[in-house]
């Protein structure tokens, strides 16, 4: 079973999915390197957009407004994941897609919709507890 984890901050360790068999493989899609697992490290957006995001992140009102724009961190992660051919290949072969954090949920949701349109019945979950339950169902 191939598990793809869409986690911009690289939130994964072996305790996250402890009931995996030795035949299972995990690929973490992230902006940061992840130890002890195959990771696809995406290019983090930089430049003017990053400076705007940092400036807007200083107040609560501006952070909420930022969530409504294309500069939202989830949207930026989705765009980076869509541009990377390695992510597309991993998702095409995935049996389970997991979004352990909010910023990965949009990318996982779009991946699930695209895979469904392509005829793939890939299970997509938000959070590790739901992913563990899905692995139990898939392997049972």
Image (cartoon, rainbow, N blue to C red):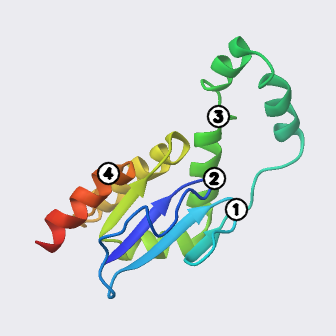
Check whether the beta carbons of the residues at disc 4 and disc 1 lie within 8 A of each other. Answer: no
Q: Residue at x 45, y 45 (%)?
A: 105
Find residue 107 and report its horizontal and vertical position in percent. Answer: 49, 50
Disc nearest the viewer among 3 and 4: 4
Q: Helix, strand, or loop for circle 4?
A: helix
Q: Nearer the viewer, residue 82 or 32?
A: 32
Figure check: 125 above or below 15: above
Cα–Cα gap, marks 1 and 2: 6 Å
For disc 3, the neighbor class at 10 Å (few under 14, some 14 to 19, many from 20) is some
If you read the primary sequence from the N terminus, does the residue marked by circle 1 or circle 2 appear first? 2
Residue at mark 2: 9
Q: Residue at x 89, y 39 (%)?
A: 48
For disc 2, the neighbor class at 10 Å (few under 14, some 14 to 19, many from 20) is some
**Residue 117 in sight:** no
Q: Helix, strand, or loop for circle 2?
A: loop
Disc nearest the viewer among 4 and 2: 4
Disc nearest the viewer among 3 and 2: 2
Residue at mark 4: 129
If you read the primary sequence from the N terminus, does the residue marked by circle 4 or circle 2 appear first? 2
Q: How many marks?
A: 4
Q: Residue at x 56, y 50 (%)?
A: 78
If you read the primary sequence from the N terminus, does the residue marked by circle 3 or circle 4 appear first? 3
Cα–Cα gap, marks 4 and 1: 23 Å
Q: Helix, strand, or loop for circle 1?
A: loop
Check whether the beta carbons of the residues at disc 3 and disc 4 lie within 8 A of each other. Answer: no
Residue at mark 1: 32
Find residue 60 and report its horizontal and vertical position in percent. Answer: 70, 15
Residue at mark 3: 72
If you read the primary sequence from the N terminus, does the residue marked by circle 1 or circle 3 appear first? 1
For disc 1, the neighbor class at 10 Å (few under 14, some 14 to 19, many from 20) is some
Find residue 82 and report its horizontal and vertical position in percent. Answer: 56, 59
């Amino acid at each position: 079973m191939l598990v793809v984890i869409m986690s911009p901050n690289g939130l994964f360790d072996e305790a996250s999915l402890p009931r995996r068999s030795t035949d299972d493989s995990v690929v973490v899609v992230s902006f940061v390197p992840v130890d002890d697992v195959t990771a696809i490290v995406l290019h983090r957006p930089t430049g003017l957009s990053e400076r705007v995001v940092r400036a807007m992140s200083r107040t609560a009102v501006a952070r909420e407004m930022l969530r409504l724009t294309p500069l939202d961190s989830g949207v930026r992660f989705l765009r980076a994941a869509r541009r990377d051919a390695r992510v597309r290949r991993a998702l095409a072969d995935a049996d389970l897609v997991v979004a352990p954090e909010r910023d990965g949920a949009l990318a996982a949701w779009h991946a699930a919709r695209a895979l469904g349109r392509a005829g793939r019945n890939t299970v997509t979950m938000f959070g590790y507890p739901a992913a563990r339950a899905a692995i139990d169902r898939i392997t049972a």
